[in-house]
Image: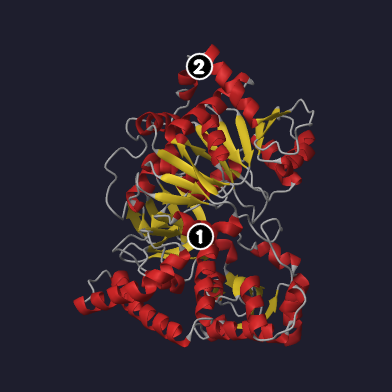
Amino acid sequence: MSRLEGAGTGAVTYPPTVIDGCDTVPKLFHQRVVRLGDKIAMREKKFGIWRSITWREYGEHVKHVSLGLVSLGFAPGDVTSVMSENNPEWLYCDLGTLCAGGVTNGVYTTDSAKQVAYLCRDSGTRYFFAENEEFLDKILEARDQIPSLEKIIVFDMEGLRDLDDPMVISFDDLLERGRAYAADHPEVWEQRRDVARPDDLAILIYTSGTTGPPKGAMISHRNLLFQMAALTEIIEFGETDQQLSFLPLCHIAERNFTIFGPIYACSTVNFAEDLDTVPENVREVQPTVFFAVPRIWEKFYSSITLRMHDATAFGRWAYRVAIGIGQEMAAHRIDGTRPPALLRARFWLADQLVLRNVKRMLGLDRTHYLGTGAAPISPDLIRWYLSLGLDMYEVYGQTENTGLATTNFAGNMKLGTVGKAAPGTEVRLSPEGEILLRGPHVFLGYLNQPEKTAETVVDGWLHTGDVGAIDNEGYVKITDRMKDIIITAGGKNITPSEIENQLKFSPYVSDAVVIGDKRKFLSCLVMIDQENVEKYAQDNDIPFTNFASLCNAPAVIELIGQEIERVNGNFAQVEKIKKFRLIEQQLTAEDDELTPTMKLKRKFVNEKYRELIESMYREAA
């Protein structure tokens, strides 16, 4: 049984759950507000202009949200839920709730009214924050099923001025209530800000529900402070750093990078306008620290790949030569060896003439840390970013350990692994090969589900549900989810995620699900990248009228078949995909097939597309 103890960059130099003398998030936040004052805390783009918000303004809004809630009867331990895209108001409500001694629960904007009802009922939500009319409609439809709900607060009242509903007030009204309460009860702010204790529940993060109804993971102030310290120890970001917030704040990774990490690091958060404008916003902000899920990194790579297809012959040649030099440099970085002087000189020239322009196109020319996590990624994709001269590191963790467990480090990385244990984290394998974690970041358990909690945390060890291995240098490799391992009719164990990751490296494949449990051979359902495949069809005069006809075009099916054959060449005969089908509908996070972080739900896809799957095996019978 392998085990790592705090492997990585060395021990944290301060108590991991007490930062600058503060043992809860509200205390640390208040300290930052007092110290940083007029330094810019965040920026958002409105009417085409980036607007800055200082730490002092940040603190004032949080205070008034907090006291506004208190004026409405909010008690320590009460729950608020937030349904909004990423914006400053999300942060004000999150920290305002914590500073009132309460608990914040994020609700995905793609959730249906039925899902909103379940999450709010399960969490015991008393106060609900809705960004706009669209999300207000969902909570109004669900409220009869939420007996604990008392007030709904709306950020943007556009189109709602004539609304007459005693349960609904505007965010501006809440702030005004908070200002008035602060004037009448000046002593309450400090009292409520300090009421929480380190092991009190701070936030609820609901799992994506890929295997059943979402479970509310209970995360404490101690969990969050430990991860603030660990995250900043690894990334080394501080007051001069810029970040872009665009992934859902209901997700623990984005919550750490947008809210809690910056409170520790004092960095500046910039809010993307929406998902569609992320590439443009990245170029505008030029973040120095940037975390994204593999789907985003695949999109960036695809955009450059397709741009090179349209480049001049000289441009394609220059890129090919430059990226080749970059690959030589990347090999040394991966091995942790110093490249020869001549190679360093060649790379400097390649960077000046070609690679820097590529990084500028992406908006990543100032970035000193790229992080990828929340889903598996192809090692070849990481190698490409390293070849550009960008530091990209794969991290691993889950909601139940408050985000971060293992990571690759600068000068200490191994592609194909998720790195070594983060500072203060212990990792080991169970006899079945399951990854187990232990440390101050392990959550309090699942809300209202003691049996599930007892199954998940045993003797202080978090059972992750991931199958993996730990090599003799301490590097952790995740092979798959335990429930996703395929056992073929011939008794062969296959980990589908490795095959799927290589398929997703293709610019024409958005996602893929490999099938084959108890079957004679592997098959695959493929979700094409609509933008890139449409461009391919247009460039090659392939007629289509809509997305379904694009998926049915023989030339497109042949294109995806070629991509599958390319990947098949990297695997043994029993691991090769023999048949495939394209999913003929465009999927978004609002569809049941996808999680809010844009991962296909394997179990749901297997059930919904059962007939399509069976057709592949009938053909082979």
State whether residue 323 appears in this view: yes
| Residue 454 coordinates in the image, percent (x, y) | 54, 44
Observer-nearest of 404 and 26? 26
| Residue 394 coordinates in the image, percent (x, y) | 42, 62
What amino acid type should be assigned to the residue bearing mark 2?
A: Val
Q: Is residue 293 left or right of residue 171?
A: left
Mark 1 → mark 2, Cα distance in angstroms: 46 Å
Q: Residue at x 55, y 30 (%)?
A: 97
Q: Which residue is mark 1?
A: 466
Please rate how many residues cluster around mark 1, counting C-alpha atoms within 10 Å: few if below 14, some from 14 to 19, many from 20: some
User: Which dot, 1 or 2, sits closer to the camera?
Assistant: 2
Observer-nearest of 41 and 253? 41
Observer-nearest of 86 and 613? 86
Q: Is residue 571 above or below residue 398?
A: below
The C terminus, quarter of image: bottom right
What amino acid type should be assigned to the residue bearing mark 1?
A: Asp
Q: Earlier in the sequence, mark 1 or mark 2?
A: 2
Numbered mark located on residue 268 in the image: none
Please rate how many residues cluster around mark 2, counting C-alpha atoms within 10 Å: few if below 14, some from 14 to 19, many from 20: some
Q: Is residue 397 above or below residue 58?
A: below
The N terminus, quarter of image: bottom left
| CB under 8 Å between discs 1 and 2 | no
State whether residue 416 appears in this view: no
| Residue 76 coordinates in the image, percent (x, y) | 55, 24
**Number of numbered tags placed on the structure image:** 2
Furthest-left residue in view?
341
Q: Which residue is mark 2?
A: 188
Q: Residue at x 50, y 71 (%)?
A: 301
